[in-house]
């Protein structure tokens, strides 16, 4: 049996659909390229039929990514499969992933069909997908609760129809490891054509068993794991990519399997996804949490001083976490910044050194010492602003004191015009937001707002994350500064620019629809 496990990443599909605000095409491309550098075999880029925006992002990723196979998800419906094929056809090779429910509760209560009807739909979907590519994956949704006879029957028919990968999802995170491993083992024993397809698993974390179930499946013969960076996804999330990757690396002696993951890229990719998705990683998260390689107990510290392997079964360097943190000041030169970024795992083409260095100097002048986390925060902020900004804060002034309303004045550039407004509020951030709202002709509501510290010490960077609601859609905004008020202002402007880009897309769609309607009438 092949001892390589294919890593199928669904951060941009299952992970993204669980976020409070959708990612922009630019943000999805950033994540896709990071996942590609990580060494992922398959990138599930989205659900093309779900929206024009998702279709566009899948297409852009398929155009850009070269070293990973790009995949699109579809229901067992011709229109869905056609949308996948249309979006992915720009790539030299691609995968279509189609699925249908197979458990009794899903078939009877959700689909309201007989199992025979569902089986026929699955066979037709696989055959239709094969018209566009030989790389077709079929998933039995809620396989963990599907009667084993029905599951074996469905898998056999899907392989016979042309599916080259069969995915067995524990969709609701219901099974236990020995139980889920037993399902995979039974399929290998009972499905006569099982050797004609690769068996994949997609486990959810509702009972905290997604990683354990995935590894049990691998031990039973599965050779593809579907997972996400930081384990993000529906409800309690998905199987965590970094955890299964490091399990296979650390326990290779027992498992006898490996992946093509570039383990030194894990920490960097985790931080990028956490930042762009506005999904903080808990400190005690395995592999990538801030405490994952910290030792507080005196006994542990004593052991670490004598030999690191007394309490570390893997090194921080093995996942791309630098042990030595170098403090930088305004006297540090470009070469030092470049060296520091490279030691953090970034390549020269990951950042513009001149832009990063200028922002570094401004920050160093404000706070004195600059730390690794500060540099990464600056880089993320630069990447966030790569797209053209329609809204820009020219200047702001905020006053607040005990027992009185806060007041704020702002000069806001909107396109080529500059608007000046002032307002009062319950606090300095509220006053600033009220002043900005006076300048804009967009009806928005701040649905969520968080302020946190990035970096070390009392003069660390203030990081503002917010979610803004516009026309029943959520948009994420992000800002950093040593001044939390300025960071908060940047975050709202970041969200407004995301809304502006969505407005532009709406306008283009409307124009296209009008042109098509006019052309149709003229015929």
Image (cartoon, rainbow, N blue to C red):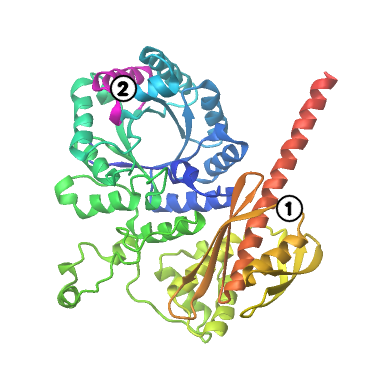
- Residues drawn in magenta: 144-164
Which quadrant of the structure image shows residue 390?
Answer: bottom right
> Total number of numbered labels?
2
Which x, y percent locates residue 235? 40, 44
- State which tag comes first along the sequence, 2 or 1: 2
Q: Nearer the viewer, residue 337 or 316?
A: 316
Confirm whether residue 381 shows in the render: yes
Q: Secondary structure at mark 2?
A: helix
Which x, y percent locates residue 466? 57, 59
Residue at x 59% of width, y 79% of height: 362
Q: Is residue 390 above or below residue 219?
A: below
Which x, y percent locates residue 337? 49, 76
Tag in front: 2 or 1: 1
Q: Which residue is mark 1?
A: 442
Q: Is residue 209 left or right of residue 119?
A: left
Question: Farthest residue toward the right?
Answer: 522
Q: CA distance from mark 2 to mark 1?
A: 51 Å
Q: Secondary structure at mark 1?
A: loop
Q: Is residue 347 left or right of residue 428?
A: left
Residue at x 31% of width, y 29% of height: 143
Residue at x 57% of width, y 39% of height: 54
Q: Quadrant of the N terminus?
A: top left
Q: Is residue 337 above or below residue 17?
A: below
In the image, which disc is placed on residue 155? 2
Q: Is residue 344 above or below residue 64?
A: below
Q: Is residue 371 left or right of residue 204?
A: right
Residue 152 among magenta residues: yes
Residue 355 among magenta residues: no
Q: Nearer the viewer, residue 368 or 108?
A: 108
Residue at x 22% of width, y 38% of height: 176
């Amino acid at each position: 049996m092949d001892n390589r496990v294919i890593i199928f990443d669904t951060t941009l599909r299952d992970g993204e659909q669980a976020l409070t605000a959708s990612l922009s095409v630019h943000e999805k491309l950033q994540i896709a390229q990071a996942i590609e550098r990580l060494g992922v075999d398959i990138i599930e880029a989205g659900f093309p039929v779900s929206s024009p925006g998702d279709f566009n992002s899948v297409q852009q990723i398929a155009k850009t990514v070269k070293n990973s196979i790009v995949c699109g998800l579809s229901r067992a419906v011709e229109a869905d499969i056609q949308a996948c094929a249309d979006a992915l056809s720009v790539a030299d090779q691609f995968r279509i992933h189609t699925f249908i429910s197979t458990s009794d509760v899903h078939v009877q209560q959700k689909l309201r069909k007989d199992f025979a009807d569902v089986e026929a739909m699955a066979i037709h979907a696989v055959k239709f997908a094969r018209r566009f590519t030989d790389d077709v994956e079929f998933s039995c949704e809620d396989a963990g609760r599907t009667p084993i006879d029905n599951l074996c029957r469905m898998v056999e028919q899907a392989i016979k129809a042309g599916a080259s990968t069969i995915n067995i999802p524990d969709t609701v995170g219901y099974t236990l490891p020995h139980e889920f491993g037993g399902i995979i083992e039974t399929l290998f024993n009972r499905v006569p054509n099982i050797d004609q397809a690769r068996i994949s698993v997609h486990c959810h974390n509702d009972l905290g068993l997604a990683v354990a179930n995935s590894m049990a499946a691998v031990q039973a013969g599965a050779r593809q794991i579907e997972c996400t960076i930081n384990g993000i996804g529906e409800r309690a999330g998905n199987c965590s990519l970094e955890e299964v990757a490091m399990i296979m690396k650390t326990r290779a002696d027992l498992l006898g399997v490996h992946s093509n993951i570039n383990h030194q890229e894990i920490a960097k990719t985790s931080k990028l996804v956490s930042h762009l998705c506005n999904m903080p990683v808990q400190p005690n998260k395995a592999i990538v949490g801030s405490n994952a390689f910290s030792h507080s107990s005196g006994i542990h510290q004593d052991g670490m001083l004598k030999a690191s392997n007394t309490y570390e079964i893997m090194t921080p360097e093995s996942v791309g976490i630098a042990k030595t943190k170098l403090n930088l000041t305004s006297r540090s030169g470009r070469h030092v910044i470049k060296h520091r970024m490279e030691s953090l795992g970034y390549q020269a083409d990951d950042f513009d050194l001149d832009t990063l260095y200028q922002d570094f100097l401004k920050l160093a002048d404000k706070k004195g010492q600059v730390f690794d986390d500060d540099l990464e925060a600056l880089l993320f902020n630069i990447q966030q602003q790569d797209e053209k900004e329609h809204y820009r804060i020219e200047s702001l002034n905020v006053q607040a004191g005990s027992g009185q309303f806060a007041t704020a004045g702002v000069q806001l550039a909107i396109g080529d015009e500059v608007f000046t407004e002032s307002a009062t509020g319950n606090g300095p951030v509220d006053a600033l937001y009220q002043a900005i709202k006076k300048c804009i002709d967009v009806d928005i509501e701040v649905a969520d707002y968080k302020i946190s510290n990035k970096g070390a010490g009392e003069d660390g960077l203030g990081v503002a994350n917010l979610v803004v609601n516009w026309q029943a859609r959520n948009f994420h905004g992000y800002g950093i500064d040593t001044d939390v008020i300025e960071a908060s202002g940047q975050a709202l402007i970041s969200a407004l620019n995301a809304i502006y880009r969505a407005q532009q897309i709406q306008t283009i769609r409307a124009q296209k629809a009008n042109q098509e309607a006019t052309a149709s009438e003229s015929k």
